[in-house]
Image: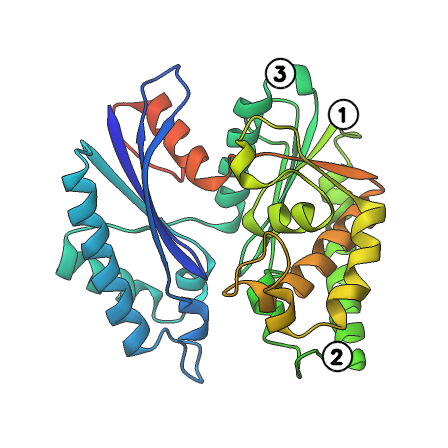
Amino acid sequence: MRLGVIDVGSNTVHLLVVDAHRGAQPIPAFSHKRELRLSEHTTSSGDIAREGIAALVGFVEECKTIAEDQGAEQLLAFATSAIREAPNGEGVLKTVHDKTGIHLQVLSGEQESSLTFLAVRRWFGWSSGRLIVIDIGGGSLELANGQDEVPDAAISLPLGAGRLTRTLQGDPPAAEDLRAMRKQVRTEIARSMRDLTRFGRPDHVVGTSKTIRSLARLCGAAPKDEGPYVERTLERADLTKLVPRLAKMTAAERAGLPGVSASRSAQMLAGAVVIEGTMELLDVPALTLCPWALREGVILRRLDAMDGWDAAE
């Protein structure tokens, strides 16, 4: 069957159309995305502003039309931290449904973490043993640890690259602001270390997200055009050298680096600080990268169920 998935994130709304059936690898057929940056279109109370809602409604309707044009039999749609945390999130969901007919399902942070873990487990298989999975988005950091397809621990922390970037002043940011952010990041992650690691040391530590892939590219990993099956890693020693380099650069200068888009260049420093801190507190020398993440986890869960979709199950 051909499935369409609309992923409403803090930075980007992404439509992915895949050809898939139960027991098979989902094959991407079409991709369409736009950076709406919903987490930045907010009022002083934290509500998603009218212009953000209007942009979301318009793009969801566009994705619906494109999915139909691409022959998608079903269209799944989910949202993460930007709508989950907005006081008017329920109203946003109702507006989207009323105007487009699309029901956006809001995933909790734990569900995000668990579904991403499922995708990574399926990609690497049982031979990878106990996994720890690290995933960073615009609004949150997800961590999971498990031996099976359902993780023993699934944790979400408010340490997204976009969220933290908004706490930094200046371009490049002031050293004292960066130091304060670094302390906040490590304090938050350290509080969760026991819950994450008490089930045992991992055999394999995996990173998955656009930010982690960009950081790995900056540290020498193969570029995207070499395909998804090339082994890519992010070494902690290389990342530790990269962080101070990024801290001295403006966002425009970072945008000139390989694998860094202009739209994400401002967030690269905060993302690097979070991932370096996570790796150090876990005492892991390197991450193996996985090309699958939350969207693929949602697709796999749907294919497993087949008789009805509920990403929160």
Residue 258 location, x and y as percent? 62, 53
Q: Residue at x 35, y 65 (%)?
A: 89
Residue 211 location, x and y as percent? 60, 52
Which mark identifies residue 126? 3
Q: Label 2 vs label 3: CA separation?
A: 43 Å
Instruction: Give the total of numbered labels.
Output: 3
Q: Residue at x 42, y 48 (%)?
A: 107
Q: Label 3 vs label 1: CA separation?
A: 11 Å
Quarter holding the N terminus? top left
103 lies left or right of 294? left
Which mark identifies residue 177? 2
Label 2 sits on what residue type?
Asp
Residue 71 location, x and y as percent? 16, 33
Which of the two labelled residues, at mark 2 and mark 3, occupies the earlier sequence position? 3
Q: Label 1 vs label 2: CA separation?
A: 36 Å
Q: In this view, does 47 lie above or below 264?
A: below
Provide the secondary structure element on which disc 1 rests: loop
Q: Which residue is drawn at 51% across and 34% down?
A: 292
**Image quadrant in which you'd find residue 88:** bottom left
Q: Is residue 65 above or below residue 247?
A: above
Q: Check if mark 3's residue and mark 1's residue have beta carbons within 8 Å.
A: no
Q: Mark 1 points at which residue?
A: 203
Label 1 sits on what residue type?
Asp
Number of other residues with Cα within 10 Å of mark 1, as a class: few under 14, some 14 to 19, many 20 or more: few
Label 3 sits on what residue type?
Trp
